[in-house]
Amino acid sequence: MLFLGKTKAELSRLREQWEAQQRALLASLLASAWVVEARDAYTGGHLWRVAMLSAQLARALGLDAVEVNRIAMAGFLHDLGKIGVPDAILRKPDKLTDDEYAVIKTHPALGARLLAQHPFAPLVLKGVLEHHETPDGRGYPAGLQGEQISLDARIIGVCDAFDAMTSSRPYRAGMPIERALNIIEAALGQQFDRQCGTVLLTLGQAGELAHIVGHSSAGIPLGQCQMCGPTLVQFHSSVAGDYLACPHCQGEYQWQATPQGHLIAQATGRTASAEALALQADTVHIEQLVRQWENVLTTLG
């Protein structure tokens, strides 16, 4: 009995170590995706918004909690392949040429290749590879049609497009939610899966997406550079007095507290320091996401 007790204790200790390693591995993967996103001055918070929109939609479709979190993970990782897109294209302030767009279109396949040998690939690979496939077969990279496209990708695809439409870009302001929903409705069965798009419309019309649009995390709205327009992302660890930088014009900002206790970014008129300009991930936010999604890791055995 004593030997058996020690064996059980040892197995419990090994299980705890394995779970800790899994959480660390997920944190590392999410941080990599975050830094890839940070290269684009206008997409701050996009990964979080797509993850949360995808979770909202998956839940409304009746999927269970583990599936909802798994699809949210895939939503956060869907643009990982943009690591292979040159800065000159990724950060271009104007609309892309056909040749430049062809480079952008390589990112789902590249993301899938990067993940192919990763232990978490079975959880997220289809969402990463197929999120730009469309029901009419005109998507990429494989021109899949209808239900050939995984449910993960059908969910992430419509949420990705909705966030792109409602987010500002150098050449246009973000659309109102209602207008973006109207565009999705007009393209149901062609660009967007009819079932997923219809449920997203219902959520949007009920006001259940507004707390995600324009935010980089729950309750944290995006800031905007007063000089040139790109997004300014508040980290969960940010406090009044901390410095940050516009990733485009390199202008320096400092967080100031409002009487209500919120933080707003105020321009200092100086050029940001190298430390403020360095790409980095919000480790506190990532730790929160890991805790939120760790039940998915148990499905790996």
Image (cartoon, rainbow, N blue to C red):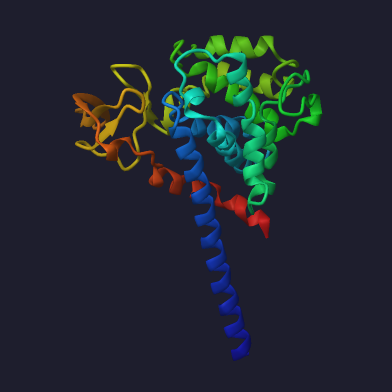
Left or right of residue 165: residue 61:
right
Q: Nearer the viewer, residue 2 or 254?
A: 254
Q: Is 289 located above or below residue 265 in the figure?
A: below
Image spot of residue 8 (x, y percent): 60, 79
Q: Quadrant of residue 168?
A: top left
| Residue 4 in view | yes
In-image side of 273 versus 152 (left or right): left
In the picture, measured across the screen, residue 147 lies left or right of residue 228, that is right
Residue 23 percent coordinates (x, y) = 52, 55
> Does residue 60 appear in the picture of this structure?
no
- The relative height of residue 137 versus residue 233 in the rendered view (above or below) is above
What residue is rendered at 72% in x and 28% in y? 141
Q: Nearer the viewer, residue 270 or 87?
A: 87
At horizontal 58% and vertical 41% (from top left) the residue drawn is 73
Which residue is the extreme one toward the bottom?
2
Instruction: Name the residue at 56% across, 79% down.
Output: 9
Residue drawn 59% across the image and 52% down it? 295
Please identify the quarter of the rendering in which residue 269 is found.
top left
Q: Is residue 186 above or below residue 130?
A: above
